[in-house]
Amino acid sequence: MDLKRILFDVSDHVATITLNRPERLNATDDLARTELAWAWGQVRDNPDIRAAIITGAGDRAFCAGQDIRATAEGGIRNKVPGSRLHHNVWKPVICALNGMAVGGALHQVADADLIIAAEHAELIDTHLQVGNVFALEPAVLLRRMPLSMVMQLALLTKQGRISAQRGYEIGLINEVVPADRLQERAREIALAITKLSPATVQASIKAMWTSLDVGLHAAHDVAYRYVLQHQMTHPDYREGMIAFAEKREPRWVVE
């Protein structure tokens, strides 16, 4: 695909998706959403990819959300969602938050499995400021952070911004690092994950996300179903224990 809005690279089993419109603070338009959908499809379907990093070009913004200027001029013609959950990607996703994440960019943040943020990064929402309902992003954010903090983002708009450090304190962000260390740290984590059984990692991630759809007892049933299915059908379950007992690196099955 001839990419114009994002960069896509795969090396050492890690895919890196970079939102690449720094002159527009990496805001997304119809073309960007199309390219993101393509990229998530690559992550999902390519067996060589075991983990993914999503980040932004430059150091000012991870993503300024929807390109309001483009929308004001032509509306939204492409409604393809741009985050991994919308494309059934169960491989581990790390969000390397290199700057501000505004509005629709909160999809990418909320839907990641791990969030590593530069010290100057911050979360901002401006949906209400431009007459847009803030509801899709909170559907996931409310499962990861307190209601009061989501309300702060929504109702205080730019004044309600949440710093990287505050995001870490409330449990949304996993690590806060110096800006010049961000990409290196995200890749360190991704490479460590690629050493794990790909099938086991995906089953675990899917089980955890799926359990959020239901109550506690039903979540136990969901989790148990994934555990049993993996134990009964996948060779990595036995291989992992044998390798541990024999004190050697496991030989995982890559499907």
Image: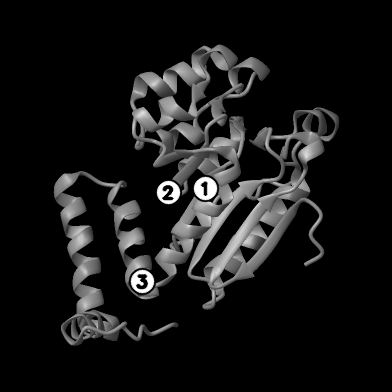
Position of the C terminus, as image quadrant, is bottom left
Q: Residue at x 42, y 30 (%)?
A: 167
Q: Identify the mark at residue 95; answer none if there is no mark.
A: 1
Q: Residue 130: where, in percent of width, then height? A: 67, 19
How many residues crowd around disc 2 within 10 Å: few (fewer than 14), some, or many (20 or more)?
A: many
**Alpha carbon of mark 1 to alpha carbon of mark 2: how far?**
6 Å
Of callouts 3 and 1, the N-terminal one: 1
Q: Which residue was labeled with disc 2?
A: 114
Amino acid type at circle 3 is Leu
Q: Identify the mark at residue 57; answer none if there is no mark.
A: none
Residue 233 vs residue 196, the one in the foreground = 196
Kindly indicate whether the residue at mark 1 contacts the one at mark 3 (C-beta within 8 angstroms): no
77 shown above or below 15: above
Position of the N terminus, as image quadrant, is bottom right
Amino acid type at circle 1 is Cys
Q: Identify the mark at residue 196; answer none if there is no mark.
A: 3
Lateral position of residue 169 relative to residue 75, left or right: left
Secondary structure beneath disc 2? strand
Q: Which residue is drawn at 56% across and 16% down?
A: 157
Would you say residue 232 is visible in this rendering? Answer: yes
Q: Residue 201: where, in percent of width, then height? A: 35, 67
Secondary structure beneath disc 3? loop
Kindly indicate whether the residue at mark 2 contacts the one at mark 1 (C-beta within 8 angstroms): yes
74 shown above or below 194: above
Lateral position of residue 64 relative to residue 50, left or right: right
Q: Residue 237: where, in percent of width, then height? A: 23, 79
Would you say residue 63 is visible in this rendering? Answer: no
Amino acid type at circle 2 is Leu
**Alpha carbon of mark 3 to alpha carbon of mark 2: how far?**
16 Å
Q: Which residue is drawn at 36% across and 83% down?
A: 252
